[in-house]
Amino acid sequence: MMQEVSQHEDALVQSIISLIDSTRQRVATTINSELTLLYWQIGKQINEDILKNARADYGKNIFAQLSEKLTEQYGSGFNKRNLQSFVKLNAVYQDVTILHTVCTKLTWSHIREIIYIEEPLKREFYTQMCIHERWSVRFFKDRMNSMLFERTAISKMPEETIIKDLEILKTEKKISPDLTFRDPYLLDFLGLHNSFSEKDLESSILSNLQIFLTEMGNEFAFLARQKRIIIDNEDFYIDLLFYHRGLKCLVAIDLKLDKFSAAYKGQMELYLRWLERNEKREGENKPIGLILCSEKSKEQINYLMLDQDEQIKVAEYMTVLPDRKILEEKLHLAIELAQNAIKQ
């Protein structure tokens, strides 16, 4: 009898804790949303006032004057830098209804970072990825610093494709392969600098699996290493096997130390056909293969039409990062070449 009472009390306590936590969350979301909309209104008034006065010196001085008076009354939340962010917020989100939707899902700290991304499509990419994968502000900054957008396949797609995929992610919560896979993958955390074998690469990935999954994306789940498959009484081994929850499919990864070779496509096709026939479950999509190489072979990939292949992805990996400027130039060149190829 005493045990039944104790269990009842525990259930009651947990129920009340759940009620308090959910209410606090709703209150915090409401406060964040209302504050962000307040900042937008402040930015709107400052913008309109500066435009109305049409004096350069007035525009320069208004932030210092306002900051001094508002800080005196309300504290450091209204310093000069924050006021400038309010103005930027109003300039970026001219339609307040769009902002209202965003600020119910992201904190002001997220939005303050987002508004300083100048390219609209890039800004929308990070907005939707923050919402979909529930990134913390710190993680969001890390993703931007690693140039995630430029490394994601979607950045090399036509503008209408980017808009369409982001809209589907926003409204249907469905992520596309082009939003999922990257090129290159940054594997500097593995500590592999000089000569190493495929086994070393694989072992280092598994030793740093949590960080590797972070680089791959939030929705990857590890399933197997050296997945054994038997075809014609011959053993084959898939280096790494994952499942992607958003794409609802198995993802086979083949690790290569050298430059991409056309033969790798046939090998991956064999793996994918086997997985589709023997491992794919009801309701899942067809498996996807990712061939990770130290270097891509652009002409072979082009002739094999792998850039247009939905099932086989080819990407480089970097175990040692180049200077950021060099990486930036390389990624921007890749985007430019891809966009030019689309136009031809």
Image: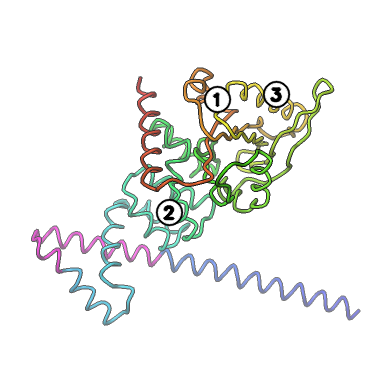
> In the image, which disc is placed on residue 270?
3
Please state which of residues 1 and 304 is positioned toward the viewer in this rendering: 304
Is residue 60 located in the magenta-colored stretch of the structure? yes
Identity of the residue drawn at 54% across and 67% down:
25
121 in magenta: no
Earlier residue among tags 1 and 2: 2
The mark that comes first in sequence, 3 or 2, is 2
Q: Is residue 41 above or below residue 144?
A: below
Residue ID for mark 1: 309
Q: Nearer the viewer, mark 3 or mark 2?
A: 3
Instruction: Look at mark 2 in the image and give the residue it sits on.
Output: 101
Q: Position of residue 97 (x, y in %)?
A: 36, 53
180 versus 21 height, above or below: above
As helix, strand or loop, the secondary structure at mark 3 comes to helix
Residue type at tag 1? Asp
Mark 1 to mark 2 CA distance (whole Å): 35 Å
x then y, percent, for residue 43: 26, 62
In the picture provided, is 283 more to the left or to the right than 146? right
Q: Report, in whole angstroms, how far the alpha carbon at label 3 lies from the one at label 2.
A: 45 Å
Residue 36: x %, y % from top left? 37, 63
Q: Quadrant of residue 6?
A: bottom right
